[in-house]
Structures are given as structure tokens and as C-alpha cells.
Image: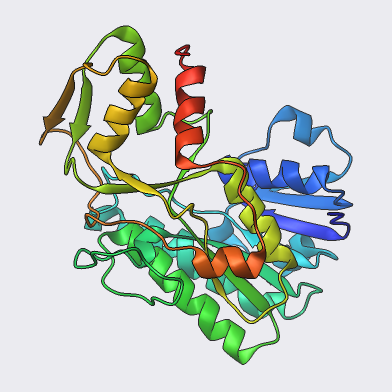
Amino acid sequence: MAIGETQVVFGGAGLLGDALVRRLLKEGSNKVTIFDIYPPKDDLLSDPRILFIRGNVESLDFDSIIKIMGDAQTLFYKVGSLGDPSISSDADKSWDYLSINALSFWKLLPVIANTNVNTIVVDSSITAVSDLSYDSPISELKRIGTPTNFYGLSKAILEDICLFEEHKSKLRIRIIRYPRVYSSTQNSFLVKFATNIYNGEPIKIFGNPDKLIDLIHIEDATETAIRCMQYRGKESVFHASYNETLTLTAIAHLMCKKARRPRHQIIHSDNGVAPREPKNASLNSVISQRALQVDYVYSLEKILDEVLENAGIT
């Protein structure tokens, strides 16, 4: 899968951005421009194929955007204010979500018309379409409902901007809705579960213990982005999902079983911060997997196996 050409990754120093940049280089990209407020890791900075431009997406002007784009043919928009459940429903902090995740992307589009970019791949989220009333896996065909927080609202607006722009221009814009992305470098709830098992401490589940959880491994999330970059069909919205979900409680029990500690204590608590999400927050990816011809390396169980192994539980 030789990539060639030149790509620009907005947010290329973040978790998903870093993984994507490394994959692009591995597949033979000639040049990758990383635009981010933070620098990438040292090994990427020293790679001659990497051009790093530091900046804040909210403060870009026409000339700056033209410089960043250069001769690139593909833009990945992976910059964003993350969906921290402790602040994503706080009206006083909502502007960061709306400005960075959506409106700053809108500002780029008129300028991109003056560049060589023909394909844009945009990171969205399950939260853009998973309103509280929804009780079944979400199809790629589902459009915006009532987002559960300001993070979800920002992603819903981002999707609307993408679809509007694609209909009125010649740009190919691909939207990827991600569920929770697992990476071994991130301190997720899975890592906390495994750490508690290893230390012999109870697993604590906050919020709704019967909430369905959808997960994707970062390698498969990156594979989806690469496939969207190469896709030339008519679909615009894609889901990165295994079509496998378990409740929070079922995940905790399965991890205990895999660790050969089936009687490990699991505690449900109403205290603590839990994301404001519907019970069934899961993505159906049948259309996406068929259109992109993607074969995922991981599965939900393989993710749990990796989490336990990394915690020293075999």
C-alpha cells in the first residue's frame, strides 16, 4: 500500500495523530506536515520527511494556511478539544469545543480551495449522533440527533459543515466516527480495571453499569483513516467499530475471568464522573467495512488480552 504524495495532519502530535503520521511514513509518504500546538515526539522531529509547524488552529490566517498546506493533496483534521466528561457538559467551557472542533475547520475550507488538497479526512465521534433516546447500534446513515454534551454538539456541527461543503465543492470529505479508542499509552478505564485486578483491589464502575461500550484499537482506528484517504466511492460517513459491544459490568467480569480471578470484587457506584451517554452507545460498521474493504487486526477480546498483558497479568 504505497502512499506516496504529501499529507498534512492537523493535530499530528496527539494520540491519533501520532499513530497516523507513523503509519503514513511506514507506507511510503514522501512528506508529512504536522500542525499542532505541541511538538511531536523527538524521533518524528528528526525525520527528514516531517515538517512541523507549531500553531493554534484558532488563530490561523489565509497566508498561514496556504503555507501549511504547501503541495499536499490530503488533509487529516485530527485537532480537537477532547471530550473530558468532567467539563464537556459545562456551558462555561463550551466555546473551546465549538471553536476548535468545528468552527476552526470551517475557517480552513475557503482557503483550501486555493491549494492542491483534494481529499479531507475528518475525525468525528460517536457522541455526534448518540443522543440519550437512542437505544440501538448507530448506522452510518444516521444523521444528527440531540447530542448529549458540548463535545458531541461540536462534532455534530463539524459533520454538518463537512457534508455541506462536500455538496457544494469538488472536495472529497470523509468523516470517521470513532467510539472509545484504546491505546496502551493512554490511561483508560480498561487500564484502571486491569491495575485493580493486579493489585487485588475492587473494580469500581461509575454511572450506569449496563451501559454498552464500543471500543476500537488505535491501530485499527489508524487503518480506517488510511482507507478513507484512498477511498474513491460515494460514501461520506464511516464507522470504526468491530460491531462488538459489552456492558461495563460484562467487560469487568470478562477481564476477571481472563485473569483467572472470577470472584474478584466489582463495585457499582453513583459517585465520581461518568460520561453523559445513552445506554446503547455503539456503532454499526457493516457499510464501512464493506466500502473500505478493511480487515481489522484486533477485536474487543484482543484488546482486553493486551490490556491484561500490559498490566503484567497473563
Residue 220: % across, % down: 60, 47
Q: Nearer the viewer, residue 301 or 118?
A: 301
| Above or below for 17 versus 102 | above
| Above or below for 141 versus 9 | below
| Above or below for 136 versus 299 | below
Image point (38%, 17%), residue name: 259
In this rendering, would 12 be left or right of 267? Answer: right
| Above or below for 7 versus 214 | below
Residue 158 in view here: yes
Image point (48%, 69%), residue name: 103
Total tally of numbered discs in the picture: 0
Residue lying at the far left in this picture: please name it.
270
Image point (44%, 55%), residue name: 243
Residue 15: % across, % down: 56, 40
In this rendering, would 105 be left or right of 171? Answer: left
In this rendering, would 209 be left or right of 112? Answer: left
